[in-house]
Image (cartoon, rainbow, N blue to C red):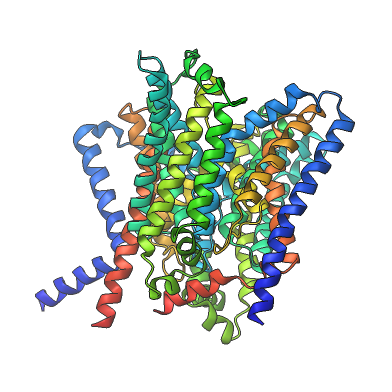
Amino acid sequence: MKALNKASTLRWCQRNLVLTILAALWIVLILVVVIAQPSIFSGATLGSILQFATLLALVSLGQALVVLCGGAGIDLSVGGNVSLSAIVGVTSVQAGLPPALLPVVCLLCGALLGALNGILVARLRIYPLIVTLGTFYLYSGLALCLTDGAAQSGVPAWALPWGRGMLGDVPLPFLTLVLPAFVIVAILLSFTSWGRWIYAMGFNEHAARLVGIPVDRMRIVLYSLCGLLAGAASFVSLSWLGSGRPDAGVNLELESLTAALLGGIAIFGGKGGVSGVFAAVLLLVALKTSMLQFGINSVWQVGVVGLLLIAVLLADRLSSRVSQINGAR
Amino acid sequence: MVNRKSLTSSLSLSGRELTLACVCLLALVVFSLSSPYFATVDNLTTVMRNSVELLLIGLGMTLLLAMGGVDVSVGVVMGLAAIGVGQLLNTPLDPALTALAGPLIGILAGLITACVVVLGKIPSIVGTLGLYGVYRTAVFALLGGQWLSGLPATLTRQLETRLLGLPVTVWVIVLAYFMVWLALRRTPFGPHLLAVGHSPDKARLSGIAVTRVRFITFIISGALCGLAATFYVATYRNVEMTIGSTLALEAIAAVVLGGTSIMGGHCSLLGTVLGVFLLRILQNGLLLMGVPSLWQTVVTGALLLLVLIAEVATGRLKYAPWMMRLKRRQSS
């Protein structure tokens, strides 16, 4: 009985190599911190990790949805989307829009930019990688051009608690935006027909079309949702930094992709869940924070994230081969 | 049916190059009329000189896209090679030897990329995105937070010596183009590459060493990036932190503009050359008309998307083979 348990655990680890790696990385990180610098463990550190994780969590959730729905789905433009939505929000307030509408503008702009990606991918059937690479440069370039590269002030004072407020040690945007978003998407994926559809089209698009799932419409909705989450992230960045920065979303595409894949979303879609993404986002931010605490220059962060991405892709590849072999047996 | 299809596709290919040449000419005429500074010998030489790196990287990117791959780390690979060349220039080494260091580093980087992407069997854009992060950090770490500047002009002078009335630079580029053309059109490697781009499964079944073809393509692209780095250092004589950050987009845009299919399977080297010139002429002309240089990225990105939409509209990209390909991979 015990041996059987052990064998099945081992098989689970082989099949879900990425999640195993994620768990191992968490354990290693915590051990290293405990041994080398236990003073990091405090409510304040937790608060700052959650604070930094807010942007990445929102964007990674959208990225995870887009990758999950298959068809080589990917959104490289999320970083540009965050920057451009933030800039559009601030400049429209500067231009005389009632400040109360700031979050609406951010969300709307993000969703529209995402919908543009979705339409190009699903309706025109262009390769998502190339489309979103083009829109990435388009959006981030526009964000730079509209501001000449300077940070834009003009965020209304009432919005600031949305980014900086704390409830105990937990930042407010984390409670009000990230947790609800993750819970809603988790429920959506597990208990609604939309969730079934997303997994079905990610697993086998042809079969999904044959059983009558509106694959193209779903895909546009998912890209828009990804954009909407990027818009929410842009609002958080506005109220956190107190100004609209054209570089608010730099490197987010790389980090969100790494977080989504490290969280167990298969790169070809149809497999994975939201809780893994949540753990992966926290791991990435905790890793970056502890690297800073250990005095490692922040330029190493992007390299470490890149290395993680490659490692996770290789592991994903390996575990899908293992499950194929097991399936054949 | 098949005959007609291949006939029209070959016609539209040559038509594409003709159209591009006409658009280039049109852009030249429009910009000469709108700005008195555009049609001067100095300015046109600048345009040509600015095209050199993109031209070389674009040739490699053409092969990659035709093979059904892509590399978004080309700009940073050029940066790494440029740092190597720059550091060697500061030593008393013969400048001709330092020029060779660029392609060598490029080949090394191409080898790493190929190992990760081809042997790891991961989608090339995601794999190279990861490598982009790694290389970017390497560039930051090697430069140590400051520009590599004030490099000696020895290499520059050597590349400007004239051979049969033309600078060495021109000869090197013509040679590079000719070599790539030779490999693509006059050796078995070319048809193999296109077959892999068209359908890796069918290529494997017909006995093509798919892995080897992919490997060689990534290495050629890396070598061309390294060669571009040599010219970059010779021209600008400094290496900045953000070197090559938009080169990948520009290269992909130029190649797609030139008529190479992003799905792989067919390519046009002449189209790429024309695409590069069109891109650089547009950028230069807009700059002279008073459009800030920040807009260049926006224009390039918009141009890429517009060309893709136009290809869909004319039916060249109608049925996405990537969906078929993925389906097969999942069902197997």
Left or right: A3, with B275 as reference point: left
User: Could you say which quadrant of the image residue A149 lies in?
Assistant: top right
Question: In the depicted view, which residue is nearer to us: A147 or A327?
Answer: A327
Q: Residue at x 30, y 70 (%)?
A: A321
| Quadrant assignment for the N terminus of chain B | bottom right
Instruction: Tell which residue pokes out farthest to the bottom in this image.
Output: A211
Instruction: Tell which residue pokes out farthest to the right in this image.
Output: B33
**Picture layout, residue A233 above or below residue B118:** above
Instruction: Tell which residue pokes out farthest to the front in this image.
Output: B164
| Quadrant assignment for the C terminus of chain B | bottom left
Question: In the depicted view, which residue is nearer to us: A52 or A269?
Answer: A269
**Picture layout, residue A179 above or below residue A162:** below
Question: In the depicted view, which residue is nearer to us: A290 or B78?
Answer: B78
Location of residue B13 in the rendering, given as x and y in whole percent from the top left corner: 68, 61
Q: Is residue B223 visible?
A: yes
Location of residue A80 in the rendering, given as x and y in whole percent from the top left corner: 61, 44
Location of residue A320 in the rendering, given as x and y in whole percent from the top left corner: 33, 69
Q: Residue at x 30, y 75 (%)?
A: A324
**Picture layout, residue A45 above or below residue B42:** below
Location of residue A257 in the rendering, given as x and y in whole percent from the top left corner: 47, 52
